[in-house]
Amino acid sequence: MEVYTVGALTRYLKELLEVDPLLQDLWVEGEISNFVVSAAGHAYFTLKDASSQLRCALFRSRLAAMGSYRPANGSAVIAHGRLSLYEAQGNYQFYVDLLQPEGVGALHLQFELLRSRLEREGLFDPARKRPLPRFPRRVGVVTSPTGAVLHDIIHVLRRRYPLVELVLAATLVQGDGAAARICEAIRALDEHGGVDLMIVARGGGSLEELWPFNEERVARAIYAAHAPVVAGIGHETDYTIADLVADLRAPTPSAAAELAVPDWRECQAQVAAWQRQMALLAARRCAAGRAGIRHAGGALLRLSPQARIDRRRQQGDDLALRAQARLTHLLAVWRTKVEGRALQLGSLDPNAVLGRGYSICWAGDGVVRSVAQVSPGDAVTVQVSDGKFRTEVVG
Amino acid sequence: MEAEGLSFEEAFGQLEQTVATLEQGDLSLERALALFEEGMRLVGRCNAMLDQAELRIRQLVPSGDGYVLADLE
C-alpha cells in the first residue's frame, strides 16, 4: 500500500488533465456568474448551466485582447481555453483565452481564436509591414484564373501602369483544398515568379466562401513570402486573417491593383514637370554665365596694365611736382643764407671802414700798426675812402 | 551614361537625381549643360517607355519539379 501526500496527488491529477488534448483545446458554453476582476486585473467567474458549475480564470492580457466586449453576470457565452488544476485550492479550473457572446457562429469563433493567437505571435505587427516597391516590374497575382477578379486586376494594371508584367499563379479560392492551393501559389510565385510584389485576391462571398483566407496556413504562407503582399479579399467590409497579415490590405481586388502600382499619367506629369524645371534651370544658369562674363569684363578692365601705367604716370608727375617744390624751397633757403653772409662780408670790407672815416697808414709796403714803426721825417702814405695821399711824420 | 536600356525605375530615379543636382546651383556652366542634356535624354527614355508600354500577362505553370512562365490568353 502506498500513501500519497495531498501535494503529490494534486500534481498527479494536474498532469492527468494537462496531457488530455481535448481538455487543452476546449470550447464550453454557459452563463456567467460571480464575475469579479482582481486588483491585478485578472477576471474570475463561474460558468454554469442548469446542472453544473465550472470555475474560470481569464488573465489580464487575454481580457485586454478581447477589445470592447465585456462579459457580465448573466451573459450567455462561449469560452475557449484549457482545463487545469489550481493546486493551492485543489480545484480544477478553466483557463479561458477567448470569450464570445453566445449565438456567434462556429466560424466566427475560430476566426477570433486564430486572430487572437496570431496577433499575440506578432504576425500582424505594423513594424513588420514591408513597403511596396515604387515602380514594380513584375506583379504576381494569386487568384482564380476564371471570373471577374483577374479581369478587374488586368483592367486596372493596363489602365494605370502598363509598364508592369503580370504573372498569374492560378488557384482555387474556395472550398476544400483551396487553402493548400493558395499556399502553394504564394510559395511558387515567391520562389519562381521573380515578382516584386504579389496581390492575393478574391471576390466577395459569404464567410464560408472566404474561409480559406482565414486559415492559419495561408496566414503563415503570406507571412513567409519574401515579396510584399497586398491583400484584396471580398468586399470593403470583409476582414480576413490574410488581410491582417498582408503588408497592405485593400478593400477590394481592384483596389489592391490600384495600390500595387503607380499611375503612369502621374509619372508622365512628373517627367514633364522635371523637363520644364530643367529647361528653366539651364536657362537661368546660362543667364548667370552671361552676367559672369560682364562682371569678368569689368574686372579685366580694372585689372588691366593700362590702369597701372596711368597710375604710375600720375605718381611720376606727383613726384616731379614735389621735387620741384622742394628745390625751390632749398634755393630760397640758400639765397637767404648767401645774402646773410654777404652782409657779414660787407662789414669786414676795409673800404667800408674807410667810408665811415677810418684811414690806413702805409709805410712802404706795410700797414702802420704801431708808433714804433715810424720816426719823425718818415714819408708815409695815407689811404682814405676815395684815394691816397703822401705825408710826413712830424713827431 | 546611356539612357537606352535603363528600366523605367532607373531612368525615373536618375532623372529625379539629375534635377536635384541641377537645383544645387553652384555648378560650372559645362557641368550644368551636361546635366541638362543628360536629363533630357532621361526624359526621352521615360516618355518612350510610357508611350510604348503594353501590359504583358503571363502565367506560372507547373513543369516537372518546378514552374515556368507561359504567356496567358
Image (cartoon, rainbow, N blue to C red):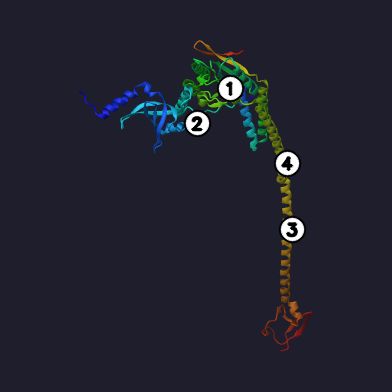
Q: Residue tagged by mark 4?
A: A294
**Residue A263 higher or lower than A181, as above or below:** below
The answer to which image quadrant residue A71 occupies is top left
Q: Residues within 10 Å of mark 1 (few under 14, many from 20)?
A: many
Label 4 or label 2, whichever lies nearer to me, is 2
Helix, strand or loop status at disc 1: helix
Q: Position of residue A40 (x, y in %)?
A: 39, 37
Please identify, in this view, whether the residue under mark 2 or under mark 3 is nearer the observer: 2
The answer for which chain carries disc 2 is: A
Judging from the image, what secondary structure is the residue with disc 4 in?
Answer: helix
| Residue type indicated by callout 4 | Arg
Amino acid type at mark 3: Leu
* Of the image marks 4 and 2, the number of the one nearer the N terminus: 2
Residue that label 1 marks: A253
Identify the disc placed on residue A127.
Answer: 2
Is label 3 in a helix, a strand or a loop?
A: helix
Nearer the observer, A52 or A90: A52
A370 or A173, which is in the foreground?
Answer: A173
User: Is A379 or A100 nearer to us in this picture?
Assistant: A100
Measured in 3D between alpha carbons, the distance from the residue under mark 2 to the one under mark 1, in whole angstroms, is 24 Å
Sequence order check, earlier mark of 1 and 3: 1
Label 1 resides on the chain identified as A
Q: Where residue A274 sits: x, y (%)?
A: 67, 31
Which chain letter goes with mark 3?
Answer: A
Q: Earlier in the sequence, mark 2 or mark 1?
A: 2
Labels 2 and 1 positioned on one and the same chain: yes
